[in-house]
Image (spheres, rainbow, N blue to C red):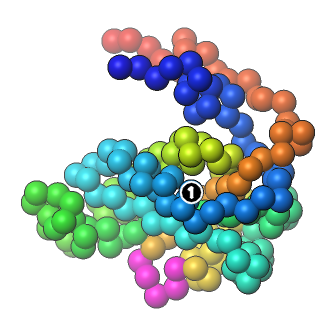
Amino acid sequence: MTADSHTLDLMFRDARTYVAWQPKPVDDEVLKRAYDLAKMGPTSANCCPMRVVFVKSKDAKEKLKPCLDAGNVDKTMTAPVTAIIGYDLEFYKKMDRLWHSGGKMFEGKEELIKTTAFRNGTLQGGYFILAARAVGLDCGPMSGFDNAKVDEVFFSGTKIKSNFLCNLGYGDASKLYPRGPRLEFDEVCRFE
């Protein structure tokens, strides 16, 4: 089975990084549907370290604002939702439910924990972007923020660390930049 052309357009070919948004709210159920799709993507040992905070309220947006680089303030403050995609350094504590041998292989192995959490949390963040597109949302993933400030404001008292932000909503296509070029297959891939 392969995806049809319309689906490929929706997920990849026509999908863009949005920086401006229509003033249309995003229903919580849409965000839940996106997560329910994203959670199905594979992670090593089914570790599932991604954690997400959906910043929607005016108060939460104001807490996020001082964490943003200047160039990301307007697009984030006007986005209906900003997802803080994080990763949990204590992910292995939930693995008794997720993996046949639990998370004991990670206990006391700080470097393995960090590498596994970051790699797989990032992978899940990519799945989340595709899932959000699949449920009809436009996305504006970005860096350009102070991770330490975000962690202090939104993850204080936890072992969760922020990875990247993703503005979500219904994009204003009239404000899109021209699509940037991409590298060709032969520039980045090889067979051995």
**Residue 72 visible within the image:** no
Quadrant where the N terminus is found in the figure: top left
Q: Quarter-wise, where is residue 136 in the image?
A: top right
Relative image position of residue 130 (x, y in whole percent): 54, 42
- In this view, the residue in front, 23 or 91, is 23
Q: Which quarter of the rendered picture does the C terminus lie within?
A: top left
Q: How many marks?
A: 1
Is 158 magenta? The answer is: yes
- What x and y, as percent, mark residue 78? 82, 63
Which residue sits at x=41%, y=77%? Answer: 159
**Is 160 or 137 nearer to us in this picture?**
137
**Residue range highlighted in magenta:** 155-159
| Spot occupied by residue 122 in the image (x, y as percentages of width and height) | 47, 52
- For image coordinates 65% across by 71% down, the residue present is 55
Residue drawn 78% across the image and 58% down it: 24
Return the residue found at the far right.
174
Image check: 73 left or right of 146? right
Q: Residue furthest bottom?
A: 157
> Quick one: SS at disc 1?
helix
Neighbor class of circle 1 (other Cα within 10 Å; few <14, some 14-19, many 20+) is some
Residue 169 in sight in this render: yes
Residue type (three-letter) at the residue carrying disc 1: Val
Residue 188 part of the magenta-drawn span: no
Determine whether, in the image, residue 87 is placed left or right of residue 5.
left
Residue, disc 1: 30
**Relative to 47, does residue 188 appear above or below in the rendering?**
above
Which residue is situated farthest in the left direction here? 101
Magenta residues, dominant SS class: loop
Above-or-below relation of 59 to 117: below
At x 38%, y 53%, the residue is: 39
Q: Position of residue 83 (x, y in %)?
A: 61, 63
